[in-house]
Image: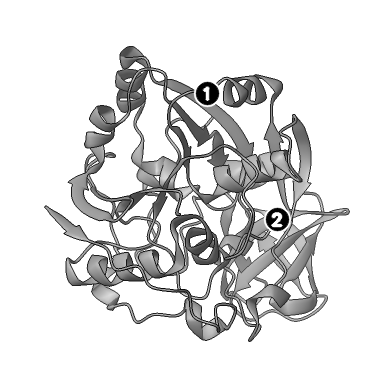
């Protein structure tokens, strides 16, 4: 099915937070993953057309010589169930190492200086800014992950260790949230692309909890994106420089990694942190021609990136169509393939 996508002149209030908001029916926030990893719908935006398809069709759309880049990160089992000394239950999401302790989010009431039982060890809680808690004591990532669970997004109400939420092609553990576009890609699908002559390559971006962070500034340009670690190897730089066909970034994390390594104009190997914030008006420096991504949360930096790459009014029109056609949104939802616009 093909239909035109309405594209109109960008409004003057393009940086107003209200421009990044939309109403989403709750039933379109998928709560359980598909039984088959790649079994999802795919909306295709190509120039002025909008096409309703299925994700496996990517194996037909991509051709020999095309380059597809994915994020090779895996999600830490960073969610640990703990207990207060009084018996109260706690749910702790360990976000990052912080000095001799860990910055966390805790579901349940705790006081500054309180001692709690975390998987059999007594640890101390300290209050940090912005609702975070710091936990100190004899604990490390190995211990956390041995006792932890996958930290599902806050909008997934059924708290299960859905293996779907773990990036099947991931090789390096370090994220506290999944690069959701990569979740659709099974090893079998990538093998099919490789056999066809499509070059499949990887970068690394360790996804932080900031991926769920809502933009609260009235002018989105005042928003600060949380710092995340990335690695773009020299092999990727060479592949991109020699790319002749489509260059497909799978996910906003891959786009941010490639743009960071390409800023301010020439792509170079890069290993370090990034706070790159892409919004309408951004001058793209990488050679990415297409982006595969899920349907994103309102008022988010992910949505602003999609506006910038896919064309603000074109994306708004596509989101309206997705809601009308009952696509699933967010981490367990359906996907979109778009070319760079204009």
Q: Residue at x 61, y 67 (%)?
A: 83
Whole-number angstrom distance, CA of label 2 to CA of label 1: 24 Å
Q: Position of residue 311 (x, y in %)?
A: 45, 62
Quick one: label 2, few (<14), some, or many (20+) residues within 10 Å? some
Q: Position of residue 52 (x, y in %)?
A: 18, 52
Residue 224 lies, with reference to residue 52, above or below; the image says below
Residue at the right extreme?
Answer: 99
Residue 279 shown left or right of residue 272 in the figure: left
Regarding residue 29, the answer to whether it shows in the image is no
- Count of marks overlaid on the render: 2
Residue at the front extreme?
Answer: 9
Residue 99 shown left or right of residue 330 in the figure: right
Quick one: label 1, few (<14), some, or many (20+) residues within 10 Å? some
Q: Which residue is mark 2?
A: 276
341 vs 155, nearest the viewer: 341
Nearer the camera: disc 2 or disc 1 = 1
Q: Position of residue 294 (x, y in %)?
A: 39, 55
Q: Which residue is mark 1?
A: 243
Regarding residue 41, the answer to whether it shows in the image is yes
Residue 114 shown left or right of residue 283 in the figure: right
Q: Position of residue 338 (x, y in %)?
A: 38, 49
Q: Residue at x 88, y 54 (%)?
A: 99
Q: Which of the two labelled residues, at mark 2 and mark 1, occupies the earlier sequence position? A: 1
């Amino acid at each position: 099915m093909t239909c035109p996508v309405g594209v109109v002149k960008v409004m003057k209030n393009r940086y107003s937070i209200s421009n990044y908001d939309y109403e989403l029916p709750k039933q379109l926030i998928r709560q359980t993953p598909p039984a088959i990893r790649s079994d999802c719908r795919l909306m295709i935006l190509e120039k002025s057309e909008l096409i309703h398809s299925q994700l496996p069709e990517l194996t037909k759309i991509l051709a020999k010589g095309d380059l597809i880049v994915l994020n090779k990160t895996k999600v830490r089992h960073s969610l640990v169930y703990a207990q207060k000394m009084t018996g109260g239950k706690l749910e702790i999401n360990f976000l990052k190492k912080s000095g001799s302790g860990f910055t966390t989010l805790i579901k349940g009431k705790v006081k500054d200086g309180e001692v709690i039982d975390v998987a059999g060890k007594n640890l101390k809680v300290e209050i940090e800014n912005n609702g975070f808690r710091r936990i100190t004591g004899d604990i490390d990532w190995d211990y956390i992950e041995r006792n932890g669970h996958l930290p599902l997004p806050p909008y997934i109400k059924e708290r299960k260790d859905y293996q779907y939420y773990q990036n099947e092609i991931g090789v390096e553990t370090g994220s506290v949230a999944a690069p959701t576009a990569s979740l659709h890609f099974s090893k079998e699908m990538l093998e099919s692309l490789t056999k066809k002559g499509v070059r499949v390559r990887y970068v690394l971006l360790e996804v932080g909890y900031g991926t769920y962070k809502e933009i609260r500034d009235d002018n989105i340009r005042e928003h600060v994106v949380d710092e995340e670690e990335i690695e773009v190897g020299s092999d990727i730089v060479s592949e991109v420089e020699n790319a002749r066909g489509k260059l497909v970034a799978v996910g906003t994390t891959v786009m941010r990694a490639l743009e960071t390594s390409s800023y301010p104009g020439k792509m170079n190997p890069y290993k370090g942190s990034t706070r790159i914030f892409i919004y309408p008006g951004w001058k793209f420096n990488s050679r990415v021609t297409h982006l595969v991504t899920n349907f994103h949360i309102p008022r988010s930096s992910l949505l602003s990136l999609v506006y910038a790459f896919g064309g603000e009014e074109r994306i708004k029109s596509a989101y309206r169509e997705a809601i009308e056609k009952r696509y699933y949104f967010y981490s367990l939802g359906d996907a979109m393939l778009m070319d760079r616009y204009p």
